[in-house]
Amino acid sequence: MPNASMPNASRFGRLGWLVLSLLVLVIDQVSKAHFEGSLEMFQQIVVIPDYFSWTLAYNTGAAFSFLADGGGWQRWLFAVIAVVVSAVLVVWLKRLGRDDTWLAIALALVLGGALGNLYDRIALGHVIDFILVHWQNRHYFPAFNFADSAITVGAIMLALDMFKSKKTGETVND
């Protein structure tokens, strides 16, 4: 039921943006299946010499292979974190108003990416990565995937949203 103090609120908030989350999830899983079926582990296909390659790598850890050598317990820790974060994002989307499109897109991207990596973690025990950015044969980033990219873009959008000017009518408490 819409709240009188929130004129832009609706019963479902911005849950329509879950379609974007689903699209991210599908693209992520299809791309991972393609590269896992096309490449041997750590094989590289150079796309742009000295800058960008396709490769196949498995990550049992989190971002930048954090806790990758944890012995297996980290799989379930990261899965639980992803489930909790995903639930929070869905509730947040539901509570957004009609004018919160930028924020809804950001949340939907993060949610879709989180679900893509969550699926890998639960079903496979590791996340499939296939994008490698490098320069002169030096790897500046670990391999990553489409889900990681969606999470990163969504997180940047969330950060930028914090700097947007306040909407008229809002008061700032000092």
Image (cartoon, rainbow, N blue to C red):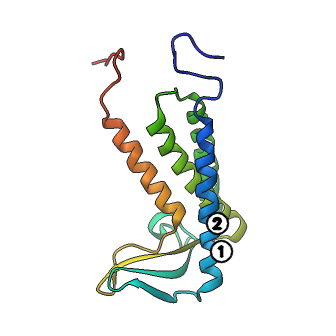
How far across and down, in percent of the image, does residue 147 sit? Answer: 54, 61
Quadrant that contains the C terminus = top left
Q: Position of residue 150 (x, y in %)?
A: 49, 57
Mark 2 crowdedness (10 Å alpha carbons): few <14, some 14-19, many ≥20: many
Residue kind at label 2, given as amino acid type: Gln
Residue plotted at (59% across, 89% down)? 40
Residue 90 is at least partly visible in this image: no
Q: List x then y, in percent, for residue 68.
A: 53, 71
Residue 20 tag number: none
- Within 10 angstroms of label 1, few (less than 14), some, or many (20 or more) residues? few
Which image quadrant for residue 47? bottom left
**Left or right, 18 with reference to 104:** right
Residue position for label 2: 29
Using the image, determine if residue 100 lies above or below residue 72: above
**Residue type of the residue flagged with mark 1:** Ala
- Residue at image location 64% in from the left, 52% down from the top: 22
**Closer-to-camera residue (53/152):** 53
Position of residue 95 in the picture relative to residue 142 (left or right): right
Residue at point 52%, 87% (across, down): 42
Residue at the disc numbered 1:
33
Front-lying residue, 134 or 24: 24
Element assignment for label 1? helix
**Horizontal and vertical percent position of residue 124:** 69, 71
Most extreme residue toward the right is 123
